[in-house]
Amino acid sequence: MHLWLGGHALLEHGGAALYDPATHLKLLSAAFDGAPPAELWAGRNDHLGAFFYPPPMALFYAPLGGLAVHLAGTIHAVLSFLGITAAGVVLGRWSRLGAVFTLLVLLTTPALFHNHVLGQNGGWVVVLLALAGLLLVRRHDLPAGLLLGLLLCKPSWLLAVGWVPFVLRRWRTVGGMVAGVGIVAVVSALFTGLGSWYAWLALAPDLAALSRAGDYPLHLQYSLWGLGRRVLGLGTPGDLLGGALSIGIFAATAWRIVRTRAPVAHQLALALCAASLVNPHLHPYDVTGGIFALAVLLAEPRTRRLGLVALLVHHGGQALEGLQGSGLTIAPATVGLLFTWAALWARLDRADHP
């Protein structure tokens, strides 16, 4: 709903209204005959509004924002499903698991079910990462970086993935990613105006501190940041623990990749799984980085049994969470991600490498 709202606000009132809470509430009310559902407007929305993404995301969703909300939602669901299906075919190629089995892994992932039901954009992240992975495996480094630059639309994933080309020592990809971010920012500014960027940058500190705002959905956060906050609570202690855990996973991943002789596909899959774990905000529809690790584990005969166990823990953990979260301090979905990462980390050099 908030994605449609960004595109709708851009079309109706221009870039100046993209981050105006009063405009958001007015448009939501109009879309729902004067009474928007309570779950679409929490207490924090009075100050932050309901569209948090940078201006390029509003530009991408503008075509859907020009349609009635229920029609737009239906079209988005179909497009998202087709995109995820295409991502499965692409991932099947560079993981060597094959399209059919990769699609079975993807389409049974609860995170992508949540993505479909909630009309979210986690599926588009999977599409981008799958395509960029194919380009990296085939050593098309610059186009891969340009593609990763599109993650500027969703900064939490840009932060989560931005270190991966450095660890892989793909310097052209680093340059391409920087260029891609710049291109996306400039092109969006041509349509939404520089004022929209100033407004979002002014809002960014509050968004970065969202965990300290009211109504923060901690029960639906599954990265190591969420784990730290569940253990020590919202605030500085929880943030410090989450940050320490994330640094540990990053360091262990980087050390393993630098020392391994495994194929690029395996290194990349490990890094993308780690990216989910260090993502600052990992909602139910975004717990997708483990899919890449599962694909390469299942593709290799020597790691297939471990891959099947990881599949059960990964998918099962997310299924236990459901749409409302399990309420457990150690979230099963986080355990699934950690187990999948650890399985690939431990077996990275023991697969049947061509």
Image: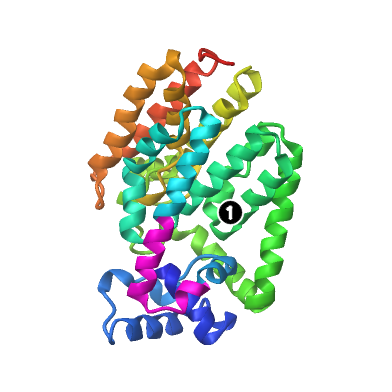
**Residue 314, image x and y in percent?**
34, 33
The one of 253 and 105 positioned closer to us in this rendering: 105
**Could you tell me which secondary element the residue under label 1 belongs to?**
helix
Examine the rendered structure and indicate whether residue 206 appears above or below residue 111. below
Q: Which residue is mark 1?
A: 151
Q: Residue at x 39, y 39 (%)?
A: 103
**Residue 286, image x and y in percent?**
42, 48
Q: Residue at x 52, y 37 (%)?
A: 272
- Visible in this render: residue 101? yes
User: Is 63 a magenta residue?
Assistant: yes
**Residue 92, image x and y in percent?**
48, 34
Report crowding for label 1: few under 14, some 14 to 19, many 20 or more residues within 10 A (C-alpha): many
The one of 248 and 293 positioned closer to us in this rendering: 293
Q: Amino acid at mark 1?
A: Leu
Quadrant assignment, res 241: top left
- Image quadrant holding the N terminus, namely bottom left
Query: Magenta residues?
Result: 62-80
- Image quadrant holding the C terminus, namely top right
In the rendered view, does 350 fall on the left or right side of 211?
right
In the rendered view, does 73 fall on the left or right side of 209?
left
